[in-house]
Amino acid sequence: MGIFEPYRAIGYITSSVPFSVQRLGTENFVTVSVGKGFHIYNCAKLNLVLVGPQLPKKIRALASYRDYTFAAYGNHIAVVKRAHQVATWSRHSAKVNLLLLFGEHILSIDIDGNMFIWAFKGIEENLAPVGHVKLDDKFAPTCIMHPDTYLNKVIVGSQEGSLQLWNISTKKKLYEFKGWGSSISSCVSSPALDVVAVGCSDGKIHVHNVRYDEELVTFTHSMRGAVTALAFSSDGQPLLASGASSGVISIWNLEKRRLQSVIREAHDNAIISLHFFANEPVLMSASADNSIKMWIFDTTDGDPRLLRFRSGHSAPPLCIRFYANGRHILSAGQDRAFRLFSVIQDQQSRELSQRHVAKRARKLKMKEEELKLKPVIAFDCAEIRERDWCNVVTCHMDTAQAYVWRLQNFVLGEHILRPCPENPTAVKACTISACGNFAVLGTAGGWIERFNLQSGISRGSYLDMSERSNYAHNGEVVGVACDSTNTLMISAGYHGDIKVWDFKGRDLKSRWEVGCSLVKIVYHRVNGLLATVADDLVIRLFDVVALRMVRKFEGHTDRITDFCFSEDGKWLLSSGMDGSLRIWDVILARQIDAIHVDVSITALSLSPNMDVLATAHVDQNGVYLWVNRCMFSGDSNIDSYASGKEIVSVKMPSVSSVEGCQDENSSEPDVHRTDTVPKDSSGLPTFKQQIPDLVTLSLLPKSQWQSLINLDIIKARNKPIEPPKKPEKAPFFLPSVPSLSGEILFKPSESTKEDTESLKVENKTKPDIPVSQFIQLLHSCAEMKNFSAFTDYIKSLSPSTLDMEFRMLQIIDHDDHQELDKRPEYLSIELLLDYLIHEISCRNNFEFIQAVIRLFLKIHGETVRCHTKLQDKARKLLEVQSAVWQKIDKMFQSARCVVSFLSNSQL
């Protein structure tokens, strides 16, 4: 698989599939499609409550009923109960386009005009449809609806412009509406009986009486585009909401038969769905711009206002970077939005404000997109000054100034940085010093200038008198960087010249030529290495102090889009338009891993903890996360899962961590199927290799092994104060037989005297108690000299059960004439001592074994004291325990001394 394994995708809110809304109790839930999966949001706060499984293909239609979600993909329909796929309906021979919840049935229509009727009650037993209707040949269905009070009847709209009324019970066409000469794009039933609204591709809305086939009123959109969504209000107001392909939502008053209000900048793309909540003045809209919005009609003039929304990038991200120790990701997209995504909690994701863009757009009667800043092409951030002043600086496409942002308040800063006002050119590169006080900007004209972030005032420019223009570079500046002590500033020009400057004095200290045009540079402040990418597809590493090239990496076959260092500086990650992601070992000077994805990576960032990698891809609006297997695998040898020079094809991360059924014709590997961490019977990872001189913990809950130590205290605390009282009216009970396993065994209802007599005879012939599983496993593992199965078994036992197993081995009658060495209890105690010696010497399950030793000595300590052979084994256990613990304590003591020295020293 490779070092990085697909995890999940973030930033996806909805796609171009209409949503499904349902009410459960007092709350409303909306199910939206996100590519091959679906999300369910609680409409009260639009918080994510459930993520569906990943399906083999993109979802084309959705329907929901209570815990069930029905998703059409390709020729199939997946039936999902909460987050688990329980069935797949496969009868269509063409792509399914429409789904409709119809009582206890689901109606599905494909592009060939086949309508199947499915029953989802008792779905596990029957996967066949209960009915099939074949629509007319020259009838391409586009929408389907059920008119209220029309029993077993549906209306289907077509691309040809006609509507048909079908009875799905008799499977007959009852009536055909001629239409209005335009393709029907949407239709919806109204609260008034016999009345429906039909939206056409020519922008007209027809409110029609289907009982008399009469048109009641016609509305026309002022803007061009098809009517893509319709919704009637059900709270008493005679309102009809319509959505257009231009992203505009129009509100029509049905009583006055005129336009009431228009939401011009509702969405940036076509409206996919509209829905009025029952008995509420709230309208929900979804669009192909990756957003869901809720509008409330509570103003005096009747115009709606935005109540709440969830949105992501409506265009692919250009630059991404981890922030806040890997908890957040800063993302700049082609949609002119600058966003902050949360890796941990999805509702914390938000767009950074550009200062009242919506209000200014309404005042100036312009689009919000026209007032927003141009797309960000480069940015840098510094967390050290987040609470003091602006700590992010951004460069924008074809913009001669840079902007600063205050991430503490998620807003655009008050200062605008304008380098070289005499001859302004577009800002191409930026960086923030390690102290967070200064920002350095590089322009397309070769000018480099330093600014103070707190005041926004220029603090000098970097000039090279040897250049013809007396600028820093003779051409575009492709990158600038500062070292960790504000001693050096490094800049790179498009023509391949790299220069090192004195940060404070702004004097040129040294320079060298790469020999070809540079594309991008990245500087690692800890190890002082500068990585450069040139148009010859070669990555070069330079030591800026020694002024020489130290590494050279070749392997990409197409343009390198982005690259970054790991936090410790040992790895260099690079991506290219060839679809590959390569990991280079800086120390060993070789490629250690390479993966190939179907969609090329355009930007990447590795978290400071090196546990998560974030990537952005071509034509993908989300940010994709990959996990570092080195952090979560017990195998310390990286070569065991790294591919080396070979390129391994990997499936991209999905929006869901749950995988649905796989398509039979799909040859892509399942990204969620991993065999890197083997699981034992207790569900906990076992590590193949152990770090020398260290111990491995059991990963059991703390309460489980601590309860072994304090079991007597727990029993005394939980001891009942009063004896149990017999209920006044006790129900009948079945007599049961006690068993060693704890399972209830019921006596037969009719037992004869012969059965009871034979049972007494058997009890007389079998005086010995059956051996428990605890003792059986102990003896069998001792014979094989492998106690792993026995350890797994006792780890699965509850503290009280393990205490009972130990007490069953107690030797009470020490004065018995039978030879002690041959007693089964004595042999089991001896084997237990051997087991404890073995486990301590292996240094596995350390804290759990310590609790077991304490429980063993507490119960069998007197028996061990009275017998010489057991004393010898106990003495050996003490020696092994002391040797293992002394090594651990020595390392602890070394760490304690260092901490004590540093804490007491005056720095």
Image: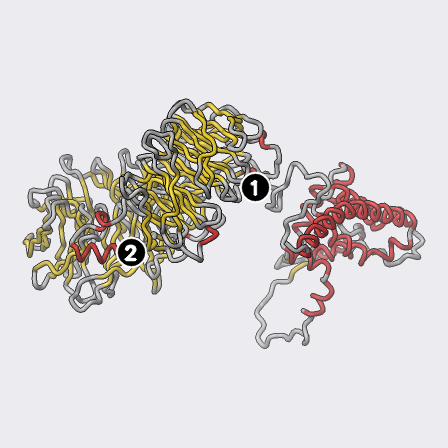
Q: With 847 as the anchor, is 870 left or right in this view?
A: right
Residue placed at 23% from the left, 64% from the top? 281
Q: Quadrant of residue 407?
A: bottom left
Q: With 669 as the anchor, is 200 left or right in this view?
A: left
Mark in the foreground, 1 or 2: 2
The reply to whether residue 107 is in sight is: no
Q: Which residue is mark 1?
A: 632
Looking at the picture, which amino acid does disc 1 mark?
A: Phe
For residue 105, above or below residue 88: below
Q: Residues within 10 Å of mark 2 (few under 14, many from 20)?
A: few
Question: From mark 1 to mark 2, how far is it between C-alphas?
Answer: 42 Å
Q: With 149 as the anchor, is 14 left or right in this view?
A: right
Percent coordinates x, y for residue 19 in the rendering: 28, 50
Q: Secondary structure at mark 1?
A: helix
Position of the C terminus by quadrant: bottom right
Looking at the picture, which amino acid does disc 2 mark?
A: Arg
Of the residues under marks 1 and 2, which one precedes in the sequence?
Answer: 2
Percent coordinates x, y for residue 389 in the rendering: 41, 56
Residue placed at 43% from the left, 30% from the top? 498
Task: From the viewer's side, name the closer residue of 676 and 248.
Answer: 248
Q: Which residue is mark 2?
A: 355
Q: With 335 as the anchor, is 789 left or right in this view?
A: right
Residue placed at 53% from the left, 27% from the top? 550
Percent coordinates x, y for residue 504 in the rendering: 46, 43
Percent coordinates x, y for residue 235 in the rendering: 21, 66
For residue 527, above or below residue 793: above
Number of callouts in the render?
A: 2
Q: Residues within 10 Å of mark 1 (few under 14, many from 20)?
A: few
For residue 349, above or below residue 782: below
Task: From the viewer's side, name the closer residue of 723 and 503.
Answer: 503
